[in-house]
Image (cartoon, grey):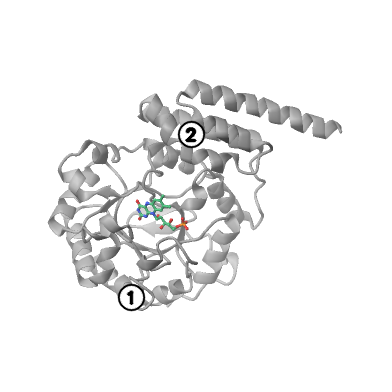
Amino acid sequence: MDTPNTNNEHIYAELTIGDVKVQNGVLLAPMEDVTDLPFRVICKRMGADIVYTEFISSDGLIRDARRSMEKLRLADEEHPVSIQIFGGDIEIMKEAALVAEASGPDFIDINCGCWVRNVVARNAGAALLKDPPLMAAMTKAIVDTVKLPVTVKTRLGWDSSSIIIEDVAQRLQDAGASAITVHCRTRDMGHSGDADWSWIPKIKKVVDIPVILNGDIITSDDVLKAFQDSGCDAVMIGRAAVGNPFVFREARHLLATGEHAPEPDFEEKVRTCLEHLRLQLLQKTERRAVLEFRKFYSGYLRGLYCASAVKQDVQQYESFAQVEDRLEAYIKFLHNHQFQNDVA
Ligand SMILES: Cc1cc2nc3c(=O)[nH]c(=O)nc-3n(C[C@H](O)[C@H](O)[C@H](O)COP(=O)(O)O)c2cc1C
């Protein structure tokens, strides 16, 4: 039985899933329309230990649907990487897992936590929390089908009156899951209310496989606190990484040294934003890349001097050259502003 960490000495233990060992266990969460290849690469460069694709429809994969197949594309530099699939039918999920495995990820992750109506209506995602034997049977079927380690991402339960995560975790371990990620909310909560990390030590008491804590980790301090308070084996960061991939570097630094890393300066923030967009251009048509990138600007530019006018401008642009010109001009402007402050 593990006890929660109360000092730093166990925090640096490697996380092992299957044959893969990683240094710190600070993971990028799967996020639909966010964790595409370019964003995963950026987060990996910043120090994320494992990155996840967004969930991919098992139906789409077995039908060879273009949009689903596109999501399977992986880059060499992003390993270890997990492909997450979702679906409600065991046979289709087995086939989809084989398709996913063929694109060369390090793990297959099963989504048993998505709360949105059209996923739940297909008996997939969090709907599986209403039928733990089915969730376990699906996991076992996929474990028996693929060679790669299989992991599961789920929630505490369907609602506050049915928190069943301890039972679910044991069933998943028995089914052969190599790790479990727990988004510490119920399905009914969606993304509202606070994630309740206090379930993690209870889960750790009943399973030996790695338990990955997810929900409401915003800063490197939260990462440290999550490890210390819960005894989790790893943490997974979602929304806080959008436009702030630096959180992975900051978490690594804090875990390794006990000190806070210096914040990225304005130039690094804006240049990383541009680099991220350049990576998008390698994967998509220019217009699509630029339009889909709009969700990232506010994160990268948050807190910077006079950023709101820049944000407004770049949200309108449809070409890379326009964005690049505006952001390069902004960097110059910020340098001038800094220079004037330094001499004042
Ligand atoms: C835009 C968005 C898309 C998401 N897509 C997925 C997904 O494809 N698969 C999944 O397991 N969870 C998905 N999630 C949930 C996140 O992985 C994570 O569990 C949740 O955001 C809580 O973590 P956080 O507080 O660190 O954001 C999504 C969340 C957001 C905000």
Query: Crowding at label 1, few (<14), some or many (≥20) Cα neighbours within 10 Å?
Result: some
Ligand 1 shows up in the quarter that is: bottom left
Q: Name which residue lies at 42% across and 67% down.
A: 185
As helix, strand or loop, the secondary structure at mark 2 comes to: helix
Left or right: 248, with 79 as reference point: right
- In the rendered image, residue 168, in percent from the top left (x then y), is placed at 30, 72
Q: Amino acid at mark 1?
A: Ile
Upstream in the sequence, badge 2 or badge 1?
A: 1
- In the rendered image, residue 54, in percent from the top left (x then y), is placed at 34, 47
Q: Name which residue lies at 57% across and 35% down.
A: 311
| 12 vs 92, nearest the viewer | 92
Question: Which residue position holds label 1?
Answer: 164
* Residue 76 shows in the view: yes
Question: Which residue position holds label 2?
Answer: 276
As helix, strand or loop, the secondary structure at mark 1 comes to: loop
- In the rendered image, residue 133, in percent from the top left (x then y), is placed at 20, 71
- The quadrant the N terminus occupies is bottom left
Q: Name which residue lies at 39% across and 74% down.
A: 203
| 114 vs 45, nearest the viewer | 114
Query: Crowding at label 2, few (<14), some or many (≥20) Cα neighbours within 10 Å?
Result: many
Marks 2 and 1 sit apart, C-alpha to C-alpha, by 40 Å
- In the rendered image, residue 164, in percent from the top left (x then y), is placed at 33, 75
- The quadrant the C terminus occupies is top right
Q: Which mark is residue 145?
A: none
Q: Amino acid at mark 2?
A: His
Left or right: 159, with 195 as reference point: left
| 89 vs 3, nearest the viewer | 89
* Residue 275 shows in the view: no
| 229 vs 296, nearest the viewer | 296
Q: Name which residue lies at 55% across and 41% down.
A: 298
Q: Quadrant of residue 304?
A: top right
